[in-house]
Amino acid sequence: MGPSRTSQTLDASSAFDEAAALTALAKRAGAGDPVATRHFLNTVWPKIGRVVVGVLGSRHPEIDDVVQQTLIAVAQALPAFRGDCHPTGYASRIALHVALRARRNAAARRARSEMLAQYSLSEPDVAQHEDLGGERRKRAMRDLLAELPEEQADALGLRVLLGWSLEEVATASGVPINTVRSRVRLAKEALRKRLENEPDLAGDLEFRP
């Protein structure tokens, strides 16, 4: 037997109260209250960490640095927080932007290193070419996000990489659900075009509608 209507109402009321309290905390932090700022950042830190790992991958060497950069960016952005979306969604979007920027920078450094490696006389490392399909798909997705327009990257990253529902993405982004659907659709089309010459990966990358 499922939860009663009363328990569902209480859960919804509790979630609303929690969001309201966190919104008030974010606004105090945005007004310059250092205690509120520390409390807010401590509250959203686990969510920020999950977003950064979702974008960079769990083995990325700069995860801790990017999380710290994100916390700084969130603190700097709090004065602009208007309270029209959930505070954790606001922080998560900032984390997504910071992590994508870090991934772009890492990709540029990797490209330079690979170019230099072409002139090396050492034998290629076979292990570098061994990759599980799941990791390849995740890396392809992350690389795509780094190339997409910001709004599409937001929608696809939150929806697919982080597993948010359409409603959650819409709330965090402050846009209607249909707008989220459109952004995800455009991002998927871009992904399919990019992978049209990689049929194995293209066949494996199936997204929820």
Image (spheres, grey):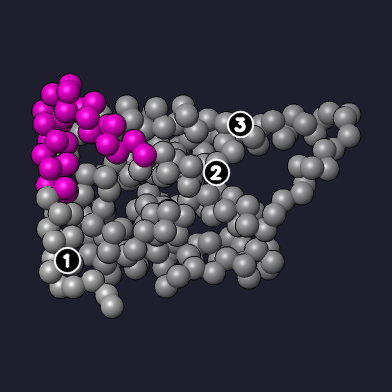
**Alpha-carbon distance for marks 1 and 3?**
53 Å
Left or right placement of residue 170 versus residue 58 in this view: left
Residue 172 percent across, percent down from the top left: 26, 53
Question: Is the Cβ of the residue at disc 1 closer than 8 Å to that at disc 3?
Answer: no
Can you identify the residue that label 2 sits on? 57
Rate crowding at label 3 as few (under 14), some (14 to 19) or many (20 or more) other CA atoms within 10 Å. few
Q: Which of the image's four quarters has the N terminus?
A: bottom left
Left or right placement of residue 135 versus residue 156 in this view: right
Q: Secondary structure at mark 3?
A: helix
Inspect the image, locate mark 1, and give the three-letter code of the amino acid beneath it: Ser
Question: Is the Cβ of the residue at disc 3 closer than 8 Å to that at disc 2?
Answer: no
Q: Nearer the viewer, mark 3 or mark 2?
A: 2
Can you identify the residue that label 3 sits on? 109
**Alpha-carbon distance for marks 2 and 1?**
38 Å
Inspect the image, locate mark 2, and give the three-letter code of the amino acid beneath it: Gly
Q: Which mark is residue 111?
A: none
Q: Residue at x 46, y 55 (%)?
A: 161
**Alpha-carbon distance for marks 3 and 2?**
17 Å
State the predominant SS element of the stretch in magenta. helix
Residue 13 percent across, percent down from the top left: 12, 58
Corner quadrant of residue 175: bottom left
Q: Which of the image's four quarters has the C terminus?
A: bottom left
Q: Residue at x 39, y 28 (%)?
A: 69
Can you identify the residue that label 1 sits on? 7
N-terminal of the pair, mark 3 or mark 2, is 2
In the image, the segment drawn in magenta is 18-46
Q: Residue at x 52, y 42 (%)?
A: 56
N-terminal of the pair, mark 1 or mark 3, is 1
Inspect the image, locate mark 3, and give the three-letter code of the amino acid beneath it: Arg
